[in-house]
Amino acid sequence: MAQLPSWLKPSKTVPQAPWSAGESNWKAKPKTYGMLLLGLWIFGTGEAALVATSAGQSPWTVFSEGVSLKTGLSIGWATFFISIVVLLFWIPLHRKPGVGTLLNVVFIAMSLEVMIPFFPNPTEPALQLTQILIGIFIVGLGSAIYIPCHLGPGPRDGLMTGLHYKTGKPVARIRLTLEAIVLTVGWLLGGTVGIGTLLFALLIGYSVAFWFGVTARFNTWYQLKTS
């Protein structure tokens, strides 16, 4: 079997980056905060591309919708309480929130709100599929920029990386498992599932791992250049 070119190989772990912070989840250089906000904005842009297709939300949004239907809460409040519960799972994984954890909630929501109108609303299946794949690719890129900042991942990404460090399992496999679980529970609760939902659950872990690999190789190049 032919091997992938080195620049296409995914990373099985969270890489270091030239913009990574030190040991603190709250203190960093301005470039780290800049890359954090950029990564969060790109992440939200990818989510906006998915929403604009009207062909299925990400699994976590399906989960939020299902909880909303069963509890009478709005999707926003359901998402908030789900985030709190997810953060509780950080405790046995020894994960600590940071400024990035807080900005995740606010900045991704802002990006989603602003960027949705910029995307088309395709009705043809081929165009919907194309935009879905682009959205997943963009979400992976945003993740690979903001997570290596080490200023605290978002609640869901923190759970993913915490399980990765705890179990030693590849990031892609952990992410796929989490997405599959919340998708199934959300669907059983009455959340809307579409082709975009299924593709997101199947591909987001590999998109993140691919962009982690790109970040790792960029960091190697940067270290050689500046040494």
Image (cartoon, rainbow, N blue to C red):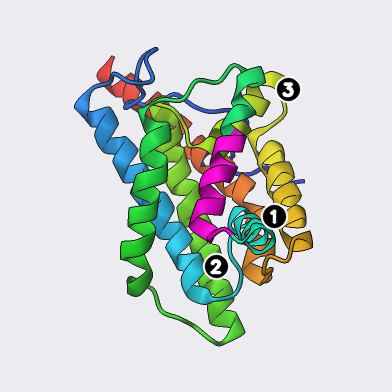
Q: Which residue is mark 3?
A: 167
Location of residue 211 with respect to 16 vertically, above or below: below
Quadrant where the image shows the C terminus: top left
The amino acid type, in three-letter code, at marker 3 is Thr
What residue is rendered at 64% in x and 54% in y? 203
Residue beneath disc 1: 202
State the CA–CA distance, disc 1 to disc 3.
21 Å
Residue 18: x and y in percent read: 33, 25
Circle 2: residue type: Ile
User: Visible in this render: residue 218?
Assistant: no
Region rendered in magenta: 73-86
116 versus 41 height, above or below:
below
Please tell me whether residue 83 belongs to the stretch shown in magenta. yes
Give, as a three-letter code, the residue at label 1. Answer: Leu
- Report whether 180 appears left or right of 225: right
Crowd tier of the residue under label 2, counting other residues whose Cα lies within 10 Å: few below 14, some 14–19, many 20 or above: many
Residue 206 location (% of width, % of height): 62, 46
Left or right: residue 176 versus residue 104 is: right
Which of the two discs, 1 and 3, labels the residue nearer the N terminus?
3
Viewer-proximal residue among 33 and 17: 33
Q: Position of residue 33 (x, y in %)?
A: 27, 32
Q: Residue at x 57, y 58 (%)?
A: 73
Question: Which residue is denoted by mark 2 in the rendering?
Answer: 132
Rounded to the nearest angstrom, the CA distance separating label 3 from label 2 is 31 Å
Q: In terms of secondary structure, what is the magenta stretch mainly?
A: helix
* 26 in magenta: no
* Position of residue 43 in the picture relative to residue 41 (left or right): right
